[in-house]
Amino acid sequence: MKLLDKIKSPADVKKLTIEELPILAEEIRQRIISVVDKNGGHLSSNLGAVDAIVALHYVFDFSKDKLLFDVGHQSYAHKILCGRNENFDTIRKKDGLSGFPNPNESEYDAFVAGHAGNSISAGLGYCSARDLIGQDYYVINFVGDASFFNGVNLEALSSTDKKPTKMITILNDNGMSISKNNNGLYKFISLCTTKRTYGKFMRFANRTVGKNFIGRALKRFKTFIKVGLNHTTASEALGFKYVGIFDGHNIKELVNILRHVKNADKAVILHVKTIKGKGVAEAENNPSYYHGVGSHLKSGNSTFSSSISQILDKFAQKDERITAICAGMKDGTGLSEFAVKYPNRFFDVGIAEEHAVTFSAGQAIGGLKPIVCMYSTFLQRSYDQIMHDVCLQNLPVIFMIDRAGAVGADGATHQGLFDISYLRSMPNMNVFAVKDVVELEDVLNHCLKLNEPCAIRYPNGNNPVFEKHIPISESLWEVDGEGDTVILAVGPRMLRLAYEVKEKAQKSLCVINARSIKPLYKSILDTFAGKKIIVLEENVLEGGFGSSVLEYVSKEGIKCDVICKAFPDKFISHATVDEQLKEVGFTVDSVLELI
């Protein structure tokens, strides 16, 4: 019988001997590999975190202690140990387990963690609530090294120099975000803390951390040594005791140090080194590729993302002012080839979306033509920077918005269903939704000529090329057919649905590829009097493209029947994209009923 079969709750982990823990960790790894091979999911990050999570569950009691992940894509081992092993096969499937921590799913999940940078702030909030209410528990932040240097975490770290006790922040350092970690502060800290002399001293000193620490004199001596070796005591200035660096795969060592830091007289940062993809040679050698995979451990095909480098290359060859910017997602946004060919014109700023946008604004006002490539769900983190730093100054920054619309198995934390609503409310911003890669290139060319803020959105997945193309310079919208019923479709999935409806309808329909969301093609809208208009969009209903159509026809007094089909006012859970679309009524039969 496997050890894992005995684990029905975290309490069962404590019944094992410390010698059995590495065996349990290996069984968890194999369980993760097996399920991700079938379902897809986040592989590399979870394999690297297994040993540390096992050690945490051995030392702490998460029926009352709080474990916060940052980011939550490294929480699979935690889920398995917290009574969810039996239905772990359902992860990322409709009505199954979420791929991220979710308090609604389990009492052991302390906080939602789909995006980076929230754990230290939330942890400090937890400690504040604990102390004011008079409760007693530990708060553990399990933070990836790229997330650790996210702007929100840095704000939390520097918010006060007095940090609460019984708060332990574990820096899970594998040198990676999703792509290789290029953060400058991370490199500085790594240089300071990986010196051999520092590591030897810290291993000696940290054996004495806690109740057995030998008084103030030794503390002062430790600080003196740290200053001499590193010329920095930043962690102390921020209110933390820094402890590290330890092997994040040596469970026995981790258990010992965790037992010690439990007794520390102040908040602790525990620095552990891990290998992303641990246990799978291919994932260890290529952790970016295996960060998020589909079934059979294959990278999911995304037609738009895979075409980005090639499209940008065509324009970059002609204009040396064009640059490409991403926020820790070089591979995911399709910029890997561009980065190799134009190393001086590619900028990966790490998991710092706000900085990426303001950095692009600085480039633009300085005379460059920056193109920011970012997932829709992450772009929303930089709302204020888009508004204040780009749109207010009317700067020619182009946002290439990947994973716009329904995203599938990543679920509620990653849906790209809000960008139309907030972007179209910004003065000076132009918003487009392209139907295929041919149109993407054409619209990008159009945006470069506009010399204004622009956003181009497109979904994930396999999106074939349509047969007909009318350049956007000739017409903002593509109009196909005539009739008293008009379908305004936004994006490739909605356009394909519109054509399927047209084939089955018992009457003539006009299908319009409404690729320009803002500005509207007002001269076409002016002809809609007396017609029925069906708007299909992969965005929430509130404030979306359909809302803009209704606003215009109401203002102009155009008497027509407008029906908006969009996503409802709720968060959409994980499932396949097709299941998500069907769930909210994006089917041929549903649209025919509207007609």
Image (cartoon, rainbow, N blue to C red):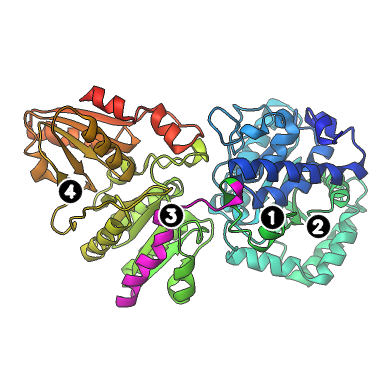
Left or right of residue 195, residue 508 in this image? left
Which residue carries the number 1 mark?
Answer: 277
Left or right of residue 423, residue 236 in this image? right
| Residue 21 belongs to the span the image colors magenta | no
Q: Earlier in the sequence, mark 2 or mark 3?
A: 2
Left or right of residue 373, residue 350 in this image? right
Mark 4 and mark 3: span between their CA atoms? 25 Å
Viewer-nearest of discs 4 and 2: 4
Mark 3 and mark 1: span between their CA atoms? 24 Å
Q: Residue at image x 93%, y 48%?
A: 212
Q: Earlier in the sequence, mark 4 or mark 1?
A: 1
* Secondary element at tag 3: strand
Which residue carries the number 4 mark?
Answer: 477
* Secondary element at tag 2: strand
Mark 4 and mark 2: span between their CA atoms? 58 Å
Look at the image and give the residue range highlighted in magenta: 296-321
